[in-house]
Image: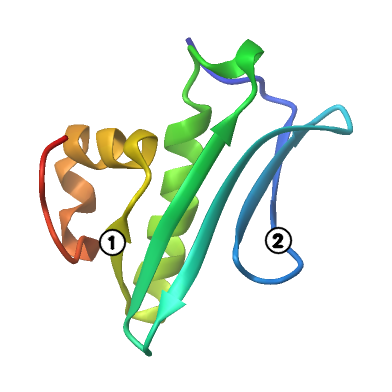
Amino acid sequence: MIADKNIEFYEQQNGQGFIANCHGKQIGEINIFFIGVDRLVIESTYVSDEYKNTNLCLDLVSRVVAFARETHRKIISMCPMAQSIFNGHPEFDDVRFIRFEI
């Protein structure tokens, strides 16, 4: 199922991830933190219940991947949801610091 076309994505004010809003309501979030100058960690991902069976988690992870590519960083995922996205998308391997299966 495709996520709602009215979803807007914003960088968090603290620069530590991205937020997804739809019609003024927060429906998703991905939180990151930085390690040194060349790595970032996906700490957690949240998707509201009504968007669980959509591509919203993939959209959030894709934003972190694009950010990592732009800033020349590698990603470590501590979040099981994000890790499952990485495991299913080998096109993200260029920014993975460590590859492991959950």
Placement of 16 over or under 64, stated as above or below:
below
**Mark 2 surroundings within 10 Å by alpha-carbon count, few (fewer than 14), some (14 through 19), many (20 or more):** some
Tell me the distance, in whole angstroms, between the alpha carbons under discs 2 and 1: 19 Å
Q: Outermost residue, bottom direction?
A: 37
**Tag 2 and tag 1, C-beta contact below 8 Å:** no
Residue at (17% x, 62% y) in the render: 94
Q: Is residue 48 left or right of residue 96?
A: right
What kind of colouring is applied to the model shown? rainbow
* Residue 17, disc: none
Residue 19 image offset from top left, x and y in percent: 68, 47
Residue at (42% x, 35% y) in the render: 58
Q: Is residue 27 left or right of residue 65?
A: right
Q: Which residue is mark 1?
A: 76
Residue 71 image offset from top left, x and y in percent: 41, 79
Is tag 2's residue or tag 1's residue first in the polypeptide sequence? 2
Q: Amino acid at mark 2?
A: Gln
- Between residue 84 and residue 90, name the one nearer to us: 84
**Mark 1 surroundings within 10 Å by alpha-carbon count, few (fewer than 14), some (14 through 19), many (20 or more):** many
Residue at (18% x, 37% y) in the render: 87
Residue 56 image offset from top left, x and y in percent: 53, 29
Q: How many marks?
A: 2
Kindly state the secondary structure of the residue where label 2 is placed. loop
Residue at (49% x, 38% y) in the render: 59
Placement of 95 over or under 30, stated as above or below:
below
Q: Which residue is mark 2?
A: 12
Kindly state the secondary structure of the residue where label 1 is placed. strand
> In this rendering, which labeled residue sits more in front, label 2 or label 1?
1
Q: Outermost residue, left direction?
A: 100
- Location of the C terminus by quadrant is top left
Q: Amino acid at mark 1?
A: Ile
